[in-house]
Amino acid sequence: SLQSAINQAYSAGVVICAAMGNEYSHITTDQSSWVSPVCNDGVLGVDNKVIGVAAVDEDDEKAPFSNYSEAYSFCDVSAPGVDILSCVWTEEGSYDSYSGTSMATPHIAGVAALVKKAHPSWSAEQLKAAVMNTAVHDLYTGPNKTGKKYGPARVGAGRTDARYAVKTTPLAYRKPKPGVVSASLGAGSSPHL
C-alpha cells in the first residue's frame, strides 16, 4: 500500500516531498478531500511523514491554484511554483515555463538534499524539521507583499529558505512522537517557537 511504502521509506531516512495539488481546494479532515500522498501518510494528527508543498509566486503570494488546508496542516511548506523554467523538449528550444505545486515540490526536495549533505547523520524527521523550521518567509494575499499574511495552516510554515535550512542546527519537532513535524499548532511543534 502507499502508506506502507511511505512508512518504509521514511524509516530508511528518505525525505518524502509531495505536491499539494492545483485545484484551489480546501483539504479538510474529510477523507474525500484528501490529495494522495500528502494526506495518506499515517494516522491523522499523529503521523506527518510527507512534506506537503504549496506554490507561491515571485512576490511571495500564494499561487491562486494551490490547494490549501485549514483544519489540519497537510501543507507543510511553500516554494516557488509559478512560471518556473523546466528542461523539456519543445519545438522552439529546450526550456519551457510551467506553474503548479509539482513545480514547487522539486525546490523542497532540493533543499532537503542540501540539508542532508550538510547534516548526513540527521534522520528524515530532523531533515523535515530543518526545512520547515527555516521556512520563515511570510506569504501574502496581495501582490508585492501587500494584504494580509497567510497563516501556517494555509501555506505551511512559509516560503522555503535554502541557505537558512542548511545552516540551522536548532530543530523544533516532537522527539517522543516520530513523524510529528508540522506547522499545525495542534498536532506538533510550531516551527516558530
Image (cartoon, grey):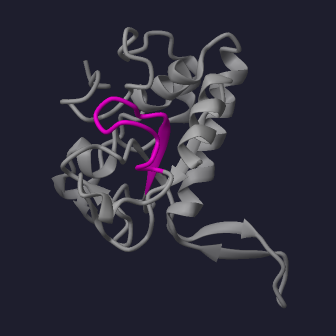
Question: Considering only vertical position in the picture, is 150 above or below 193?
Answer: below
Relative to 42, is 73 on the left or the right? left
Q: Residue at x 29, y 21 (%)?
A: 189
Question: Residue 163 appears in which quarter of the rendering?
Answer: top right
Q: Position of residue 83 (x, y in %)?
A: 55, 71
Q: Position of residue 48 (x, y in %)?
A: 41, 34
In the image, is residue 133 part of the stretch drawn in magenta?
A: no
Q: Residue at x 44, y 25 (%)?
A: 179
Quarter of the picture holding the C terminus:
top left
**Highlighted magenta segment, given as a residue range:** 38-54
Q: Which of the two residues, 94 or 187, is positioned nearer the viewer here?
A: 187
Q: Position of residue 98 (x, y in %)?
A: 60, 74
| Majority secondary structure of magenta residues | loop
Q: Residue at x 42, y 31 (%)?
A: 132
Asked whether the viewer can see residue 63, the reply is yes
Q: Position of residue 73 (x, y in %)?
A: 29, 43
